[in-house]
Image: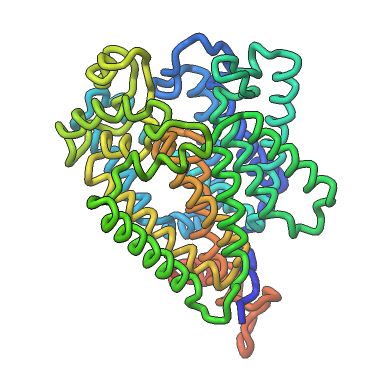
Amino acid sequence: MQASPARYVGVPRMQWEQHAIVLLIVCAVLFGLLPSGFNWNYDIDSTDINTGSLGFQLQWGSVFALSALLLARAPVMAWAHVRHVNPFLWAMALYCAMTMLWSPAPTVTLKKTIQLLGLVMLGLAVQLNGKPWTHTVLVALAAITGIQLASAVAAVAFPSIGIDAYFGYAWRGVVSNKNTFGAIAALAVLLWVSVWHVKSLPPWVRWAGLFLSAACVLLSTSSTSLTIAVLGPTVFFVLRRQHVGSSLWLLRVVVLMVMVLVALLHGFFVVEGHYPSRTELLAPFASLFGKSADLTGRSDIWAPLMLEIDRHWVQGVGYGAFWLGPGSASQPVLDTLPWVPYQAHNGYLDMFNELGAIGLVLFAGVVVSHSVSLAKLMAYDRPAAALFSALMVTTLVSNLSESSLFRSVEFPFLLFVLSSVTVTSTLLRQRMAMAKPADGGTRPGTDAKPRRQRVRAGRRAAWRYPV
């Protein structure tokens, strides 16, 4: 029998602090999705997010400062949550900072590392409200829906801003490009599905939000977003309930899928005499969306980039120090291309290039540790575990075509960090709740203790029940 959902035990917050946490969530969504500095001049280059314009620094600096203030006002609970953050996430942050020693742009690497730590602080600050995950999702959905409605107005009334004529009049709304617009909508589809069971949400709001998000996915004409919009809810529904009596049903499904994959590879080898190449693997899927097997020219970037990776494949060139435009470390790649890219359009290649094999190993540790925490969360709050699992899967998949993981304050990476911190913090609250009576009273056979002793007992409980 599945355990009851986790009881959310948090420190009592003052009213302004609760409002501040809501403001943090809204600002994180707006700053992560809207153009840097709210500048809709699409003719300028895209280096602001790398070098850091004044507007960009003021936006995120205010978010990180408010997060630090909230954490400082609850040091005991904040430290308990800090201790239970994914350890490999801390290791990645430490290694990113270490790459300043050999980075060709150490100042940029330092800024990117501060942004990474700031995102973790943001995630920790959000956890201090002690409210269920649905509260955070609904606040984020409100902000995303506002962006979608503003995008619809921009596309109709201001087509020079809201429509990208270069890509067949695809909608990009008030965000930077059509792919980002589609990714927002695909995420919103998943979030609307995940809160469908919230009774306080009127049915017409759910249907209107879901319809608006699905329409935005189609109007973006982004094949990746369409894939994510289907994949995310599918993963959520598969994990939302235990469909088979055995507790190992999911493991059996995975093993069966691996066996089928091995059989298909063997059959291909028997018929063709060789294993399928990357082009042969991608061609059937790319043709479904009218794309070429080279992922719309992305391989033109990958070939020269691999030559650069060979020069520093162990330690990487330096966190965030490669794609800085003409004259930067990416110049040898730019010399082979007729345009100026600011990413490899493959997040794993970018990670390999900037952080090397060491960074890839640490990132694998981040994913494995997060997966273990999700498996533990399944026993306490299955809908939450299903949502965060779907977010992880969709982020890992979309990172194949759009670099987002460990890319400054890119919104998918922000969500990945926030979900990781939320999962570990939820597990911590559950363990603390199990050590405390549900009615908040004293344990049977014990007398009420003075406040100082209760505070000390709470501190010991935070240390005693690791995730």
Q: Please tell me whether residue 391 is drawn above or below residue 240 in the rendered image.
A: above
Residue toward you, 137 or 26: 137
Q: Residue furthest bottom?
A: 445
Q: How was this image coloured? A: rainbow
Q: Residue furthest front?
A: 271
Q: Please tell me whether residue 214 is drawn above or below residue 34 in the rendered image.
A: below
Q: Residue furthest left?
A: 311
Q: Please tell me whether residue 389 is drawn above or below residue 346 in the rendered image.
A: below
Residue 132 location, x and y as percent? 65, 58
Q: Quadrant of the N terminus?
A: bottom right
Q: Residue at x 27, y 39 (%)?
A: 352
**Does 107 sit left or right of 397 as displayed?**
left
For the question of whether residue 10 can be seen, the reply is no
Residue 362 location, x and y as percent? 29, 50
**Does 142 sit left or right of 300 as displayed?**
right
Q: Quadrant of the C terminus?
A: bottom left
Q: Residue at x 23, y 50 (%)?
A: 274
For the question of whether residue 80 can be seen, the reply is yes
Residue toward you, 113 or 44: 44
**Does 186 sit left or right of 306 as displayed?**
right
Residue 148 location, x and y as percent? 70, 31
Q: Residue at x 48, y 17 (%)?
A: 54
Answer with the quarter of the image where residue 434 lies: bottom right
**Does 110 sit left or right of 429 as displayed?**
left
Q: How many labels sit on residues?
A: 0
